[in-house]
Image: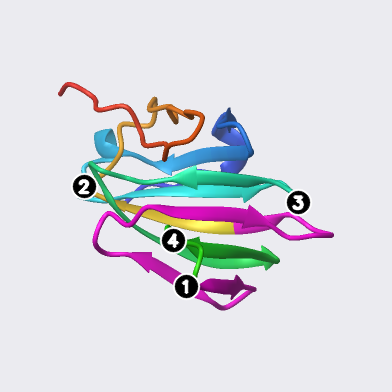
Amino acid sequence: MFIRSIDEVPKVEWGQGTSQRVLTKKDGMGFAVAHTVVRKGTEAALQYRNHLEACYCIGGKGYVVSEDRQTRYEITPGVIYVLDEHDAHYLQGGEEEDLILVSIFNPPINGDEAHELVDGGFSSYAATTD
């Protein structure tokens, strides 16, 4: 057993918000957990090609939008969204408040990955070598 406070974990800036990687691959649990904040009024085009991800909203409001922009889901506290097919998507902070998520990754992230934000394309975490 171990205990870790979010106050002990550095904030990683990812372009439209921050991520605190509370549990990573080195912890040996087979998955990773991050505290993610998406800033209000922002949008990021994301796709996790190396990880599956589930995000559970614990605060604020925001949206997940399908790659073709045909479907927009409101995300509020108590709602989970699951990217079970490495789905490309747009993640939007709320109009008036940040979106706060607990993000679960499988396989686990190392914790030092950074989004590769590209104009006109979908970001992903850079592949790591372990």
Whether residue 93 is in magenta: the answer is yes
Q: CA distance from mark 1 to mark 2?
A: 19 Å
Q: Is residue 21 above or below residue 87?
A: above
Q: CA distance from mark 2 to mark 3?
A: 29 Å
Residue positioned 58% across, 43% down in the render: 6
Q: Residue furthest left?
A: 130
Helix, strand or loop status at disc 3 = loop
Q: Which residues are magenta?
A: 71-100
The residue carrying mark 2 is 107
- Mark 3 vs mark 1, CA separation in Å: 19 Å
- Which marked residue is nearer to the observer: mark 2 or mark 3? 3
Direction from residue 66 to residue 109 in the image, left or right: left
Q: Nearer the viewer, residue 83 or 6?
A: 83
Residue occupying the point 55% across, 71% down: 72
Circle 3: residue type: Lys
Judging by the rendered image, the residue that carries numbered circle 1 is 80
Per the image, label 2 sits on a secondary structure element best described as loop
The verdict on residue 123 being magenta is: no
Q: Secondary structure at mark 4?
A: loop
Identify which amino acid the numbered label 4 is placed on.
Asp
Percent position of residue 67, x then y: 42, 57
Q: Residue 29, image x and y in percent? A: 23, 49
Q: Residue at x 43, y 37 (%)?
A: 121
Amino acid found under the numbered disc labelled 1: Ile
The disc, 2 or 3, on the residue closer to the chain's N-terminal end is: 3
Q: Give the mark nearer the N terminus: 1 vs 4.
A: 4
Question: Which quadrant holds the C terminus?
Answer: top left
Q: Could you say which disc has been placed on residue 68 in the image?
A: 4
